Amino acid sequence: MQEKIITAQNVEFHYDNEYEENAPVKQVLKGVSLDIEKGSFTAILGHNGSGKSTIAKHFNAILLPCGGKVYVEGIDTADEEKLFDIRQHVGMVFQNPDNQIVATIVEEDVAFALENLGVNPDEMRERVDDALKSVGMYEYREHSPHQLSGGQKQRVAIAGIIAMRPDCIVLDEPTAMLDPKGRREVLKTIRRLNRDYGITIVLITHYMDEAAQADRIVVMDGGTIIMDDVPKEVFSNVETMKKIGLDVPQVTELMYLMGEAGLPSDTHIIDENECVEALLKLLK
């Protein structure tokens, strides 16, 4: 049995309505329970308002539960004295890299949090260089972040988190503002961090092709988890996904439409190579 890095137990959450007295409280999370195992790559899907970003922000104590508990490496996130420890274990990357970049030189930006932590200069140099190399941005270390593309900026933002040496990185729609090239760059980086460095990844995304590359997909709707399985099993539920306003990978959609037309098909197919093989068999 794999060791767990994050445990959410019956988490409930609502935002207080500060502007309207006696307004009904909107419950965003309704008893969410979820374990994230060390070294895993989990994607969390859901349409806007499903609660996926809200649960992600509980994983490094940006938000605290209104009910239930969240533990990071056994530490209760409600323990204010342990906030630093929690964020040493779990780093967070957001949608807009411009909101996370604070310095005028790439390597200074990656070093920013380490300076605040009082890391000694020699170790800081090593951590910054290692972090930039791990995201393929070392050659840009002396550039201005504002001269970089969106995908490159996001990789610098990820490097800033990696330099802190967390066990887990939570990425909240990190490719939402990027063009296709930038999306590919960032996803390739995320996969390499998981595969080569053993960093636990939690990816919040609305791109089905990104989710298909995870080990596990959690689907949320209306503040609850409605599916939790490997990608092939989740995406094979085409009608359920469509019912809650989500897509499936294009090749899965093709297989589904073929089945609807009475042709042999398999909705467990989620990548192009598998799809090609299935079509070739059908044509023989």
Image: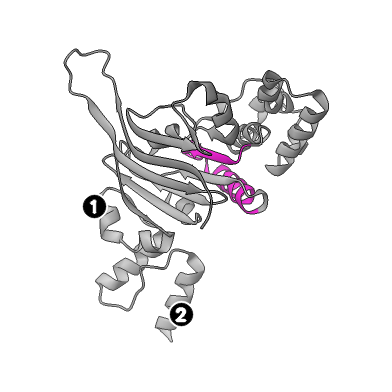
Q: What SS does tag 2 mark?
A: helix
Question: Which of the two residues, 206 or 181, is positioned nearer the viewer here?
Answer: 206
| Amino acid on which disc 2 is placed | Leu
Residue at screen point 19% across, 12% down: 21
Q: Is residue 191 left or right of residue 111?
A: left
Question: How many C-alpha atoms fall within 10 Å of the one at disc 2: few (<14), some, or many (≥20)?
Answer: few
In the picture provided, is 131 more to the left or to the right than 251?
right
Instruction: Where is residue 226? Give x, y as percent.
Output: 29, 50
Q: Is residue 112 above or below residue 88?
A: above
Q: Position of residue 224 (x, y in %)?
A: 29, 43
> Which residue is depicted at the point 62% across and 46% down?
189
Quadrant for the C terminus in the image: bottom left
Q: Disc 1 marks which residue?
A: 243
Residue at (54, 34) in percent of width and height: 93
Residue 188 inside the magenta-drawn segment: yes
Q: Give the magenta-colored segment's residue range.
A: 166-195
Residue matched to label 2: 280
Residue 207 disc label: none
Is residue 67 shown in magenta?
no
In space, the residues marked 1 and 2 are separated at their CA atoms by 31 Å
Q: Earlier in the sequence, mark 1 or mark 2?
A: 1
Residue 60 visible in the displayed image: yes
| Residue 174 seen in this snapshot | no
From the viewer's side, name the closer residue of 179 and 121.
Answer: 121
Residue 239 image point, x, y percent:
26, 59
Question: Depth check: 280 or 154 in front?
Answer: 154
Q: Give the vertical position of 233 relative to 117 (above or below).
A: below
Looking at the image, residue 6 lies above or below residue 261: above
